[in-house]
Image (tube, rainbow, N blue to C red):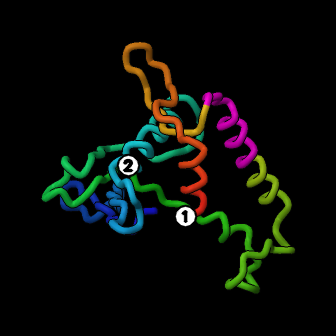
């Protein structure tokens, strides 16, 4: 979970803001136990998805660990800022904005489009066949992705209990 982020806006030739086009994110101290590892793992997943799928993920601009950030503020990821609409805003019942109920009057074509996109993403994710759950990385010499740190069952149980 990230709890600190900021958008950067680029201007060209004094013609005014072109809109936010980058976002920097920091995992919040106290919210994430292993912040450097979290950022490293997220960056690896983003790279894998961009390289081997058509799943839309923001382009990485830069990233670094605590030691790389000014005054060791913490690990960070800078990526393209992507405008979008929350899926819940499309699907939920507009008469009850507090609860996440499916809109009973939703356009069937919209619902079919959403389900089709979700199915496509799931099929692409299921193509990966790693031997265990854990952190992945790319071996630059062989250009292959593999799990480099497997989570032990005890670690996984501990993580799930904290979720």
Give the number of the disc on residue 33: none
Residue at the spot of label 2: 39
Residue that appears at 30% across and 46% down: 63
2 vs 1, front mark: 1
Residue placed farthest to the left in the image? 71
Say if 134 sits above or below 69 in the image: above
For the residue labelled by badge 2, is the local secondary structure a helix, a strand or a loop? Answer: helix
Dominant secondary structure (helix, strand or loop) of the stretch shown in magenta:
helix
Say if 67 sits above or below 27 in the image: above
Residue that appears at 50% across and 25% down: 145
Based on the picture, tell me whether residue 135 belongs to the magenta stretch.
no
List x then y, in percent, for residue 8.
29, 61
For the residue labelled by badge 1, is the local secondary structure a helix, a strand or a loop? Answer: helix
List x then y, in percent, for residue 150.
52, 36
Q: Does residue 75 appear left or right of residue 37 in this picture?
A: left
Along the viewing direction, whichever of 39 and 32 lies nearer the viewer:
32
List x then y, in percent, for residue 140.
38, 20
Residue placed farthest to the front in the image? 154
Magenta span? 117-131
Along the viewing direction, whichever of 140 and 87 lies nearer the viewer:
140
Tell me if mark 2 has few (under 14), some (14-19) or many (20+) residues whose alpha carbon lies within 10 angstroms of its own. Answer: many
Count up the numbered dots: 2
Residue at the spot of label 1: 162
List x then y, in percent, for residue 149.
47, 35
Q: Does residue 161 appear left or right of residue 117 in this picture?
A: left
Q: Quadrant of the C terminus?
A: bottom right
Along the viewing direction, whichever of 145 and 90 lies nearer the viewer:
145
Residue that appears at 80% across and 59% down: 111
Based on the picture, tell me whether residue 127 belongs to the magenta stretch.
yes
**Residue 13 falls in which quadrant of the image?**
bottom left
Tell me if mark 1 has few (under 14), some (14-19) or many (20+) residues whose alpha carbon lies within 10 angstroms of its own. Answer: few
């Amino acid at each position: 979970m990230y709890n600190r982020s900021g958008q950067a806006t680029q201007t060209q030739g004094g013609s005014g803001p072109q809109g936010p086009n980058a976002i920097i994110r920091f995992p919040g101290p106290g919210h994430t136990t292993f912040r450097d590892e979290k950022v490293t793992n997220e960056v690896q997943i983003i790279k894998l998805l961009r390289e081997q799928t058509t799943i839309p993920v923001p382009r990485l601009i830069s990233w670094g660990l605590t030691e790389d950030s000014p005054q060791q503020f913490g690990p960070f990821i800078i990526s393209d800022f992507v405008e979008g609409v929350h899926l819940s805003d499309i699907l939920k019942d507009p008469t009850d904005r507090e609860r996440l109920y499916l809109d009973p009057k939703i356009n069937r074509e919209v619902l079919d489009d959403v389900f089709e996109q979700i199915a496509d993403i799931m099929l692409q994710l299921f193509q990966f066949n790693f031997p265990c759950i854990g952190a992945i990385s790319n071996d630059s010499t062989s250009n292959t992705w593999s799990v480099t740190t497997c989570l032990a069952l005890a670690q996984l149980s501990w993580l799930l209990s904290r979720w």
